[in-house]
Image (spheres, helix red, strand yellow):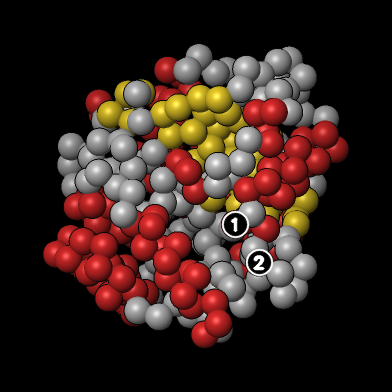
């Protein structure tokens, strides 16, 4: 366990040993996910000699809920990340974040560039600013209400059919169902669903231009992952100086969903950028 900001109890775990040539990697997951949904159980990174620290965001997975139902914004998530680094005595790390975790790690890198050796942004969902579209916000609220009142099945009813080709819907439906079932405090996840989309992580493309560490962006094609638009990843690559952009080939399953292949892409990036602890 680790103590997050405001005394929140965060569940964290480690694998691998690390070395001067293999910096520690800290993994941050997306909204409604858990620590298992960054490299999806792959051991490629630890077998390559890296120390891997993964943790469940406040209210998610095995972590405790926030003391205030409103305390799930990006400032809270960034403070939690810093608390994990301090508790694990990690001075300079590679931050690997997916979706909500991508925004969290990027915001942390902007605030503490001296503690970030490199940044991996997996399927970023937005440009750091709060959502303002009433329809989108109503959908987040409906998902929260469904989870709060009806558990996993309530969430699935609110989610409806995944916005992909019919042949992929069963696979994605089952993956979402499994992910939502992993939370000890589903009411806390519902609170996060209401707060995170309304929170500011960083100030748009102007902030992206201020990122000063080597950065890899892992995009997904819109056919299978429209909730993480390829165009957002392209804008990250355009505005972050020297950033690399990678993705699966058109028609293939998303690279972000394939833990071993994703891990190898991260290793290749770290080697090309000559990232050391």
Question: Residue 106's image quarter?
Answer: top right
Q: Position of residue 265 (x, y in %)?
A: 75, 46
Residue 144 visible, this orientation: no
Q: Which residue is drawn at 82% across and 34% down?
A: 271
State whether residue 171 is above or below residue 205.
below
Q: Residue at x 21, y 61 (%)?
A: 151
Q: How many marks?
A: 2
Q: In this view, does 100 lie to the left or right of 239?
A: left
Q: Position of residue 273 (x, y in %)?
A: 82, 36
| Outermost residue toward the right in this view | 272
State whether residue 206 is above or below residue 223.
above
Alpha carbon separation for disc pair 2 and 1: 7 Å
Dot label at residue 253: 2
Q: Judge by depth and name the residue closer to the eye, 107 or 31.
A: 31
| Outermost residue toward the bottom in this view | 166
Question: Residue 193's image quarter?
Answer: bottom left
Q: Name the residue under label 1.
A: 257
Q: Position of residue 45 (x, y in %)?
A: 67, 33
Task: Check if mark 2's residue and mark 1's residue have beta carbons within 8 Å.
Answer: yes
Q: Residue at x 39, y 55 (%)?
A: 179
Q: Is residue 167 left or right of residue 45?
A: left
Mark 2 surroundings within 10 Å by alpha-carbon count, few (fewer than 14), some (14 through 19), many (20 or more): some
Q: Judge by depth and name the residue closer to the eye, 26 or 249.
A: 249
Q: Quadrant of the N terminus?
A: top left
Residue 61 visible, this orientation: yes
Q: What element carries label 2?
A: loop
Q: Is residue 70 left or right of residue 72?
A: left
Q: Is mark 1 on a helix, strand or loop?
A: helix
Q: Residue at x 55, y 47 (%)?
A: 40
């Amino acid at each position: 366990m680790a103590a997050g900001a405001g005394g929140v109890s965060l569940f964290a775990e480690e694998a691998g040993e690390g070395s001067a040539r293999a910096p520690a990697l800290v993994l941050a997951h997306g909204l409604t996910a858990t620590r298992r949904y960054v490299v999806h159980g792959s051991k490629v990174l630890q077998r390559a000699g890296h120390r891997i620290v993964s943790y469940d965001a406040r209210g998610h997975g095995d972590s405790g809920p926030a003391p205030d139902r409103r305390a799930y914004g990006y400032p809270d998530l960034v403070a939690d990340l810093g608390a994990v680094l301090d508790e694990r005595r990690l001075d300079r790390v590679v931050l690997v974040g997916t979706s909500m975790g991508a925004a969290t790690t990027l915001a942390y890198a902007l605030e503490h560039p001296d503690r970030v050796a490199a940044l991996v942004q997996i399927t970023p969902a937005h440009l750091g600013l709060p959502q303002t579209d009433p329809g989108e916000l109503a959908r987040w609220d409906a998902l929260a209400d469904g989870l709060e009142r009806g558990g996993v099945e309530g969430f699935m009813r609110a989610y409806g059919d995944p916005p992909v080709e019919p042949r992929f819907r069963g696979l994605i439906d089952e993956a979402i169902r499994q992910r939502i079932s992993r939370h000890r405090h589903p009411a806390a996840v519902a609170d996060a669903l209401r707060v995170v989309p309304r929170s500011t992580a960083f100030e748009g493309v102007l902030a992206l231009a201020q990122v000063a560490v080597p950065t890899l962006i892992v995009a997904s094609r819109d056919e299978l992952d429209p909730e993480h638009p390829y165009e957002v990843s392209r804008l990250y690559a355009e505005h972050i100086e020297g950033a690399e952009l990678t993705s699966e080939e058109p028609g293939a399953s998303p690279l972000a969903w394939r833990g071993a292949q994703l891990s190898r892409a991260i290793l290749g990036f770290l080697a090309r950028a000559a990232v050391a602890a």
